[in-house]
Image (spheres, rainbow, N blue to C red):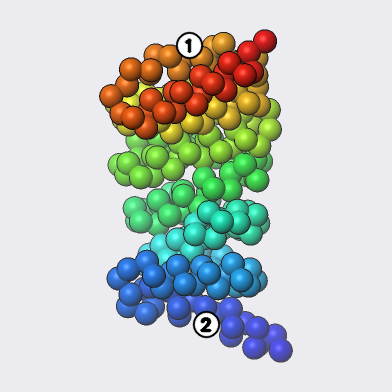
Amino acid sequence: MMKDTDDTLMAILDTLSSRTGDETQQSNRSTAERCLEDPSLLAAMAEALSGKEAALLGDCAEVMTIVASQKPGLVAPYITCIVPLLSSRTTKVRWEAMHAFSLVAHLVPEAAGAVLEQLQAMIQTDKSTIVRDYATDALGNLARADRESASAVYPLLQEALLAADGKHAGRALAGLLHVVTMVPELADEVRIIAEAYAGHSKPVVRRAVKALVKTCDLNRR
């Protein structure tokens, strides 16, 4: 019975895009749907994340991302398998891993908090805009975990506002909303930060400002 179970777990890897020759995301999405129906299949994804084959790593990380976008609690137990991939030399692997990580950060504050310095550095220096985007999201999502986490990411989100000539300002402002929710005494201070972006040229940033100002006003003391 154990062998049959192992065979089933490993067979799921053969349904991934790199194994089927599918150049679209459809195979990985279909595999993710199977994992949502049977979460035990995620064990095979997690085990494969320790491999060396970049294409397979990217596929497995993408499946984790798709599952986490719907049910982050299913992916949270595998966070220790995902974190090492944040340092992958392969951009696709790095961004899929960071995306999955960002979606579950609030559920694993201890593990996420342990890599804050790495996230801080990546937001400033990673060559991939997508990786930097998701690293900023990870900070904001971690702020949802608890007051301590929100306080820890607050200065990092302020730095993220200015990173890459402000490319990640919208995401950083969205993260600050969670900081204020957890640490309401920062509302006045954060409102001033938000107002500086009220006339930003990008609509997404202006929308983030509007939401953040509203949250600040609701939490002002």
Q: Is residue 164 above or below residue 7?
A: above
Q: Which residue is pictured at 66% across the width and 41% down the height? A: 110
Callout 2: few (<14), some (14-19), or many (20+) C-alpha neighbours within 10 Å? few
Q: Position of residue 25 (x, y in %)?
A: 37, 66
116 on left or right of 136: right
184 displayed left or right of 174: right
Question: At numbered mark 2, what does the secondary structure look like: helix, strand or loop?
Answer: helix
Q: Quadrant of the C terminus?
A: top right
Query: Residue tagged by mark 1?
Result: 192
Q: Which residue is mark 2?
A: 11
- Name the secondary structure under disc 1: helix
Rendering coords of residue 28 (x, y %)? 43, 69
In the displayed structure, 5 sits above or below 203; it is below
Which residue is pictured at 53% across the width and 34% down the height?
140
In which image quadrant can residue 202 be found? top left
Is residue 57 visible in the rendered structure shown here? no
**Residue in the image at 53% along x and 54% along y:** 69
Residue at 45% from the left image edge and 61% from the top image edge: 62
Q: Earlier in the sequence, mark 1 or mark 2?
A: 2
Do labels 1 and 2 touch, CB within 8 Å? no
View extreme (right): residue: 1
Which x, y percent locates residue 117?
Answer: 51, 34
Disc number placed over residue 16 in the picture, else none: none
Residue 118 coordinates in the image, percent (x, y): 48, 38
Q: Quadrant of the N terminus?
A: bottom right
Compute the Cα span from label 1 to label 2.
54 Å
Pointer 1 local density, CA inside 10 Å: few below 14, some 14–19, many at least 20: few
Amino acid carrying label 2: it is Ala
* Any part of residue 74 in sight: yes
Disc number lying in front (1 or 2)? 1
Q: Amino acid at mark 1?
A: Ile
* Closer to us: 28 or 109: 28
